[in-house]
Amino acid sequence: MRQTFVKPTTAADIPALQTVLNGTGLFPSNLLPDLMAPYLTGQSAAFWLSCHHKGVAVGFVCTRPEELTQGTWNMLALAVLPELQGQGCGSVLIAGVEAHLRLMRQRLVIVETSGAQAYSTARRFYVSQGYEEEAQIRDFWDKGDDKIVFRKVL
């Protein structure tokens, strides 16, 4: 994707990222300012990266350290505008996360997603990025909707 870059997310990115959330339905976009507030004020070790295309935030990733672990991080959310999915934004976001964590000498990233058919594209995407399926927790999200946990050693 030409004219695309990743940078730390700022408060100015919030309106565009709310549009991303409205398009993907990942979670309600009105929650975004409160979810980002601890990161933006430096009160959280979590970090957010945004993918910008032609000067506009079109995707984001949020990652935080797993409590009570040494060097394990959880990629909590990854979203890209639906019309730009499959064009490399998700890949550059993950590469940005991994580069940041390697610089910090962290060792492991996990990502959790649904086992439902609607998430099959997401699961294939994580595999394409070098993540391995590590665990399945049956009926986690709801009856018949398993949690699938992927991991990648940095």
Image (tube, rainbow, N blue to C red):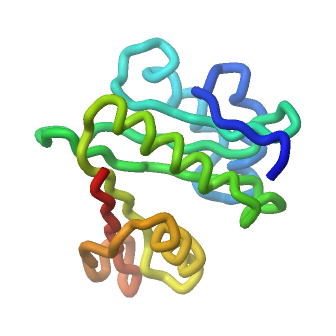
Specify the quadrant of the image occupied by residue 90. Answer: bottom right
User: Where does residue 95 sit, x and y in percent of width and height?
Assistant: 52, 48
Q: Nearer the viewer, residue 71 or 16?
A: 71
> Is residue 41 left or right of 144 when viewed as pictured?
right
Q: Between residues 65 and 97, which one lies in front from this camera angle?
A: 97
Instruction: Please name the residue shown 76% across and 54% down the image.
Output: 81
Question: On the picture, is 79 further left or further right than 107?
Answer: right
* Up-down relation of residue 5 to residue 59 (above or below): above
Relative depth, front residue between 92 and 29: 92
**Left or right: where 48 falls relative to 103:** right
How many dots with numbers?
0
Left or right: residue 89 versus residue 134 is right
Residue drawn 35% across and 73% down? 148
- Residue at 52 percent across and 28 percent down: it is 36
Q: Of all residues shown, which one is farthest toward the top?
A: 41
Residue 34 is situated, as x and y percent measured from the top left of the image, at: 53, 28
Q: Residue furthest right?
A: 54
Q: Position of residue 19 (x, y in %)?
A: 78, 44
* Residue drawn at x 44%, y 73% as measured from the top left: 114
Which quadrant would residue 14 be assigned to in this image? top right
* The quadrant where residue 52 appears: top right
Q: Where 38 falls versus 1 (above or below)?
A: above
